[in-house]
Amino acid sequence: MVEYVNDAYPVPTYRYTIDIDGDGKTDATFSGVSGLELGVDTIEYKDGMGNWFQMPGQRQAVNVTLRRGLLPKDGPLYSWLMSVSSNAVDKRDCTISLTDESGGTPLVTWKVSDAFPVKLTAPNFDASSNEIAVEEISLLGNRVSVEFD
């Protein structure tokens, strides 16, 4: 019996894809993603009897940071970034997937609703370093949901 690596080892976390226009195609790949968090504000209430209560309040916004090598300027993600800089806010429902080693099969998918780009951070350039140039793209969204494929 042949045993596959995925059956015996944890899922690797190094290949992420994003679909920003809902067509099911990969618009960009990333080597790192952070900020996929579900959170709510808390409301504190103290009654006249000395009791103290904490209750869930409004959902918190989702701040997602995507890291990758330099972004090609002819791709859909770059065009979306530039549309925001011209004050044309285009909120989209994005799908971010952690894929297997081949990049073809999604293992876990996060759906970020009503997202738009808020920041593009250029890489740090250091001539004495042999690191690759990695830029960061930050998205702000309303909510995130998780699907296990």
Image (cartoon, rainbow, N blue to C red):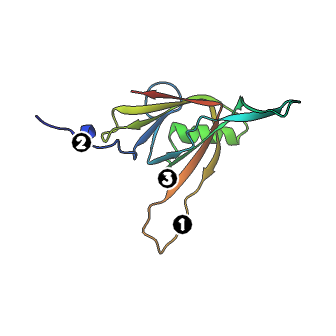
Q: Which of marks 2 and 1 is in front?
A: 2
Which one is in front, 117 or 80?
117
**Amino acid at dot 1:** Phe
- Label count reads 3
Q: Where is residue 11 in the image (x, y as percent from the top left)?
A: 35, 41
Which of the image's four quarters has the N terminus?
top left
Q: In percent of the image, x 60 and y 37: which residue is there?
A: 80
Give the mark nearest the N terminus, 2 or 1.
Answer: 2
Checking the image for residue 70, the label placed there is: 3
- Mark 1, other Cα within 10 Å: few <14 / some 14–19 / many ≥20: few
Q: Is mark 3 on a helix, strand or loop?
A: loop
Location of residue 142 by image quarter: top right
Checking the image for residue 5, the label placed there is: 2
Q: Where is residue 20 in the image (x, y as percent from the top left)?
A: 53, 32
- Mark 3, other Cα within 10 Å: few <14 / some 14–19 / many ≥20: few
Q: Which residue lies furthest to the left in this view?
A: 1
Report the side of 130 relative to 94 (left or right): left
Q: Would you say the residues marked 2 and 1 are in contact, meaning their CB atoms lie under 8 Å apart?
A: no
Q: Which residue lies furthest to the front in this view?
A: 49
What residue is disc 1 on?
A: 125
Q: Would you say the residues marked 1 and 3 are in contact, meaning their CB atoms lie under 8 Å apart?
A: no
Q: In percent of the image, x 24 and y 42: which residue is there?
A: 5
Which one is in front, 36 or 39?
39
Q: What element carries label 1?
A: loop
Which one is in front, 41 or 4?
41
Give the mark nearest the N terminus, 1 or 3.
Answer: 3
- Mark 2, other Cα within 10 Å: few <14 / some 14–19 / many ≥20: few
**Amino acid at dot 2:** Val
Q: Where is residue 84 in the image (x, y as percent from the top left)?
A: 68, 39
Report the side of 114 relative to 125 (left or right): right
Q: Is mark 2 on a helix, strand or loop?
A: helix
